[in-house]
Amino acid sequence: MANNAPSAINAALPNPKQDMADLDRLEHRRFALRYALDEIATLGPSIDPPKATEERAEASAVLDEEATRILCAPEVGALLNRLESNSGIIGETRAAQVKILKRDRSSLVDVPADERAAFCRLAVEANDVWRRAKAANDWASFEPYLDRLVAARVRMANAMNPDADPYDVWLDQYEHGTNRAFYDPFFEQVKKCVVPLLAECMAAPRKPNHRVVDGTFDERRQWDLARDLMHLEGVDTDALWLGSTEHPYTGGPSIGFVAIATHVYPENVLSNVFSMLHEGGHAMYEQSVDPEYRFTSLKGGTSSGMHEAQSRFFENYVGRSEAFSEPLARLLAKHFPGQLGRMTAHQLYMAENCAEPGLIRCDADELTYPLHILVRYEIEQLLFSGEAKAADVPGLWADRYREYLGVEVPTDTEGALQDTHWSDGDFAYFPTYALGSAFGAQFKAAMVRQGVDFDGCCAAGNLAPIREWLRANIWHWGRAKDSAQLIRMACGEDFEPRYYTDYLVEKFSDIYGLAR
């Protein structure tokens, strides 16, 4: 065991072969610690009893502290520098490992260990408080935790990069190379498209409706439906744990162990459908990373934006497509023959694509969804700049939902308490949902240009060619390549948001009979 410890790394050793062996030992040790930490984080919220929260928080903090201590050791910094200087002889994979480890280390090395440990404990406790607060419509109980979480993230950002705006620091953490200067024009372009398009849809004489899928749907049958959706989508069920939770998520410690946690609502069968397709996109990304990366820092998705590109791709570009409504209608009829057995594919397509301003982000239609993200993006900036405190959030939330979506927010459960992200300290994550949607539109256009019969695959319920394009161009690379590199490789061009806005205009103009 002593030979695997960071202290065994000889900072003066000039031998690249020995350095590579030390890198492998470092990665393997960190893998084991991250495996334990990720398994706790993945399964704990779903299976732990309420009284386990404090112990889970403590275990998480200790494991995180140890993983950080190992990576931030001075001799590890020297090792990574030596390997970087020998990048020409260590091979492409190890060079990518060094790049990612140095990036990960730079986000940790200047943050005091006690600060990180305290944040880890706080986030577990805050998440538990949030769950109870959401159920009870009790913003006041969560409010002090939100202020503490924001303050902690600001302190950490200042330690990581004292010359940068704290919110920009976290935007970059979730999507490398981004900041508000990147996101502001992106959201402005999306807003200029979506707001008038939504108004036109609301005023159009032709209006689809979702009455065909209204009703009460047995929960046990919905769970059977969820499992069939995984098979239809292509998730490897031999590398999957499926469970129940308040807020759907995908996690897991390894390529061979990915978890989907979701929920079913008796009054909303489509919520289950699109949650499963969304989370399945995340799961397939994690399961499809190059096996060579299993025990290294290259395991997993390269960024939150690229991860959300996969989930939003299968939820929307596949799941809500007209072509896929054929196999999806058949699957729904199989599980609910009495209620949905006579529903046509066209009726389902119309039902799942109603542009209907609402309160809940996770159940939002494809057109209004980015407006939900815009609300959160704007509020997060106010919190990080000190222009707003947690006590102001429900009012800010209500004002923006009234302005952007034209809806009144009746409760905090349906408002600022609906999402889990802030309780985990995941500020600056929300913008990646909209960014991922835009990535996905560009991927769809590229795969069609390159010969994938997208609509034919969806209509046949055979998604293998679509999955294989994503596997070869995106999933295989794990964290070895950044989003910008992957987009250039896969699409032959840099990121271009117009694919997203053009897609929305074309799709919803057709559905609502708008002149173009």
Image (tube, grey):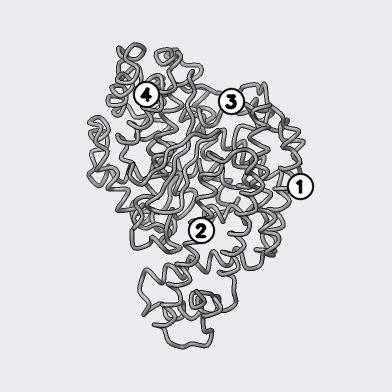
Answer with the quarter of the image where residue 129 lies.
top right
Judged from the image, the secondary structure of the residue bearing numbered disc 2 is helix
Numbered badge on residue 510: 4
Residue contact at pointers 3 and 2, CB within 8 angstroms: no
Amino acid type, mark 3 = Leu
User: 104 left or right of 123?
Assistant: left
- Marks 1 and 4, the one that precedes in the sequence: 1
Residue under label 2, please give it.
Answer: 34
- The amino acid on which the numbered mark 1 sits, given as a three-letter code, is Gly
Q: Please state which of the two labelled residues, at mark 3 or mark 2, is closer to the viewer.
A: 2
Could you tell me how far apart the alpha carbons at marks 3 and 2 are, in whole angstroms? 36 Å
Q: Is residue 143 visible?
A: yes
Query: Viewer-nearest of labels 2 and 1?
Result: 2
Tell me where residue 114 appears, x and y as whole percent: 70, 62
Q: Nearer the viewer, mark 4 or mark 2?
A: 2
Q: Residue at x 42, y 81 (%)?
A: 86
The amino acid type found where label 2 is placed reads Arg
Mark 3, residue position: 359
- Tell me where residue 125 appears, x and y as whole percent: 67, 44
Q: Nearer the viewer, mark 1 or mark 4?
A: 1
Real-space CA distance between mark 1 and mark 4, rounded to the nearest whole angstrom: 44 Å
User: What is the CA distance from the residue labelled 4 to the residue labelled 2?
Assistant: 47 Å
Which residue position holds label 1? 386
Residue 212, picture quadrant = top left
Q: Earlier in the sequence, mark 4 or mark 3?
A: 3
Residue 370's x, y, as percent?
Answer: 52, 35
**For the residue marked with disc 4, what is the amino acid?**
Asp
Q: Dot 4, how many residues are within 10 Å of its Cα: few (below 14), some (14-19), or many (20+)?
A: few
Residue depicted at x 41% and y 19%: 351
How crowded pointer 2 is (Cα within 10 Å; few <14, some 14-19, many 20+) is rated as: many
In three-dimensional space, the C-alpha distance between marks 1 and 3, rounded to whole angstroms, equals 26 Å
